[in-house]
Image (cartoon, grey):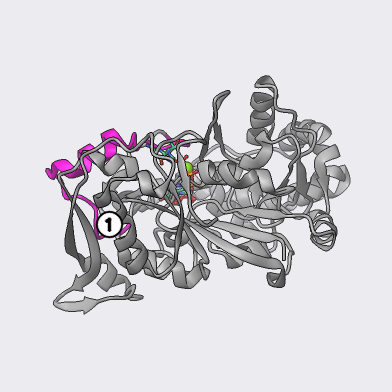
């Protein structure tokens, strides 16, 4: 059975781009199945350092067909900018296949994302303001526009007209923002359609045929388990199913074709935007600043400083169960080399009640205080280690402890941003 799903296990930015790039050479297709250009996936090779938002990270391998599946939302302008950028680096993109059923991010989606955040004031979600939530909202309320609509000018125009009847009222009457004309949007989007048309197709049978021919398919998740609309820290989440199930509904490939589910897990935790984060280093705790500085924890998409904290094994166990992880790729272990002691959260204390599993009650999660275990640091540079045995004993102890707490094998360990700074054991 040929397919692997790669997912984020925390609040995003675990290094999914790096791990996708690392393992891509054995796959023929790399598929994004949810999210849009809220994602920022970094790929570092000896030739380039790329920040990918919408195009699957596998694009750097010329033999791979990259696919943007039906579960994604696409801002065509951002997609074309990304294609131009990659082609400028000498990476041809005509192989890209885009699902005709993927939904289109419209200009008013971006406006409404920003307006909604301003309306929420102090309770804002801290979205990337890329229009992701409003685009998924329209998909679910069955008034969205799909990539295939852009190929039929008559249909697109009718749908834009219908959408603007509602959107212009909301923009002007609720938020006091400028409105759009049908011509304005059609002129802009038909120009995008001209360039994207050769790439837009029905990607589901494409993947079925690949699957039937025994070709290997890799699903590259964006965002992460704790940002999943159903399983994350709602409402401080994104608007799609980032967990493994999303790969099925976001591509049309059967769950029977999946044989590996690889969770990418940072050796500590970061989060961008608002919402509960039990192990976040409290203000004034120098550990948080040091994790941020050593780990260069600034967003790839928005440049925002990421909130930082110690490893959370409650989140890790939850991610193993919700996704059915067969393997874990632990990233950024090298960042912990500078610490004398390293804390690991093994449970939460929520108002005097101990939780070994993720509390589903929002109030409990907001009150969760970490119960820490302390492990000794190894204080040694590990960025040159290429096998598990080369790691210092205390670093191996850390990996083994996390593996036992999480409940799935750590098959890959990353010790630096580049492709070769990796220890592969049993993947
Ligand atoms: P993604 O969204 O999950 O793909 O992760 P991002 O690319 O947003 O953030 C991960 C950051 O960590 C990027 O800057 C990577 O280059 C970097 N990175 C990935 N793995 C490692 C690692 O093992 N060590 C270090 N030091 N950096 C890493
Ligand atoms: P990758 O794929 C980290 C966060 C935003 C915000 C919330 C909702 O690089 O891991 P949205 O714009 O999606 O409506 O914002 O989700 N968020 C991410 N955080 N990494 C990401 O992607 C993210 N994509 C969205 O910061 O809190
Ligand atoms: Mg990222």
Rendered location of residue 369, percent (x, y):
19, 65
Residue at the farthest front position:
389
The quarter in which the N terminus is drawn is bottom right
Residue 219 visible, this orientation: yes
What residue appears at the point 46 percent right and 42 percent down from the top-left corner? 422
The quarter in which the C terminus is drawn is bottom right
Q: Is residue 322 above or below residue 101?
A: below
Residue 168 visible, this orientation: no
Where, by quadrant of the figure, is residue 190 drawn?
top right
- Magenta stretch contains residue 281: yes
Where, by quadrant of the figure, is residue 296 drawn?
top left
- Magenta stretch contains residue 130: no
Rendered location of residue 360, percent (x, y):
36, 75
Q: Nearer the viewer, residue 91 or 277?
A: 91
What residue appears at the point 52 percent right and 46 percent down from the top-left corner? 19
Rendered location of residue 150, percent (x, y):
80, 44
Where, by quadrant of the figure, is residue 43 drawn?
top right
Q: Residues within 10 Å of mark 1 (few under 14, many from 20)?
A: some
Left/right placement of residue 370 relative to residue 182 reads left
Q: Which residue is mark 1?
A: 397
Left/right placement of residue 345 relative to residue 99 reads left
What residue appears at the point 14 percent right and 41 percent down from the top-left corner? 286
Q: Is residue 208 above or below residue 256?
A: above
What residue appears at the point 53 percent right and 54 percent down from the top-left corner? 133
Predominant SS of the magenta segment: loop
Rendered location of residue 415, percent (x, y):
39, 40
Left/right placement of residue 152 relative to residue 43 reads right
Write down the region rendered in magenta.
Answer: 275-302
């Amino acid at each position: 059975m040929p397919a692997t799903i790669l997912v984020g296990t925390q609040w995003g930015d675990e290094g999914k781009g790096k791990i996708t790039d690392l393992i891509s050479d054995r796959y023929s297709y790399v598929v994004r199945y949810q999210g849009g250009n809220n994602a920022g996936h970094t790929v570092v090779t000896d030739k380039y350092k790329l920040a990918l938002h919408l195009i699957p990270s596998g694009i750097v391998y010329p033999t791979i067909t990259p696919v943007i599946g039906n579960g994604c939302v696409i801002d065509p302008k951002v997609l074309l900018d990304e294609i131009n950028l990659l082609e400028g680096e000498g990476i041809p993109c005509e192989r890209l296949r885009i699902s005709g059923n993927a939904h289109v991010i419209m200009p008013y989606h971006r406006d409404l994302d920003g307006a909604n955040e301003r309306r929420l004031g102090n309770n804002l979600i801290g979205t990337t303001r890329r229009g992701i939530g409003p685009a998924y909202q329209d998909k679910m309320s069955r008034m969205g526009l799909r990539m295939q609509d852009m190929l039929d000018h008559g249909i697109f125009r009718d749908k834009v007209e219908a959408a603007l009847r509602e959107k212009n009222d909301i923009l002007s009457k609720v938020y006091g923002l400028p409105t759009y004309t049908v011509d304005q949007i059609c002129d802009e989007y038909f120009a995008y359609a001209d360039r994207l048309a050769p790439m837009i197709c029905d990607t589901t049978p494409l993947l079925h045929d690949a699957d039937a021919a025994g070709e290997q398919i890799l699903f590259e998740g964006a965002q992460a388990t704790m940002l999943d609309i159903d399983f994350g820290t709602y409402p401080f989440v994104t608007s799609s199913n980032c967990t493994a199930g999303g790969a099925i509904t976001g591509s049309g490939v059967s769950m029977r074709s999946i044989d590996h589910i690889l969770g990418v897990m940072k050796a500590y935790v970061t989060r961008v935007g608002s919402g509960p984060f039990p192990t976040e280093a409290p203000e004034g705790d120098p550990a948080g600043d040091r994790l941020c500085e050593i780990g260069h924890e600034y967003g790839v998409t928005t440049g925002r400083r990421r909130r930082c904290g110690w490893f959370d094994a409650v989140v890790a166990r939850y991610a193993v169960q919700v996704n059915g992880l067969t393997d874990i790729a632990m990233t950024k272990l090298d960042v912990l080399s500078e610490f004398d002691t390293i804390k690991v959260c093994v449970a939460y204390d929520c108002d005097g009640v101990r939780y070994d599993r993720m509390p589903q009650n929002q109030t409990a999660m907001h009150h969760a205080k970490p119960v820490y275990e302390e492990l000794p640091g190894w204080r040694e540079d590990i960025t040159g280690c290429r096998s598990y045995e080369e790691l210092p004993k205390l670093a191996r102890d850390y990996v083994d402890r996390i593996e036992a707490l999480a409940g799935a094998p750590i098959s890959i360990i990353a010790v630096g941003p580049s492709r070769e700074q990796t220890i592969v054991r049993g993947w």
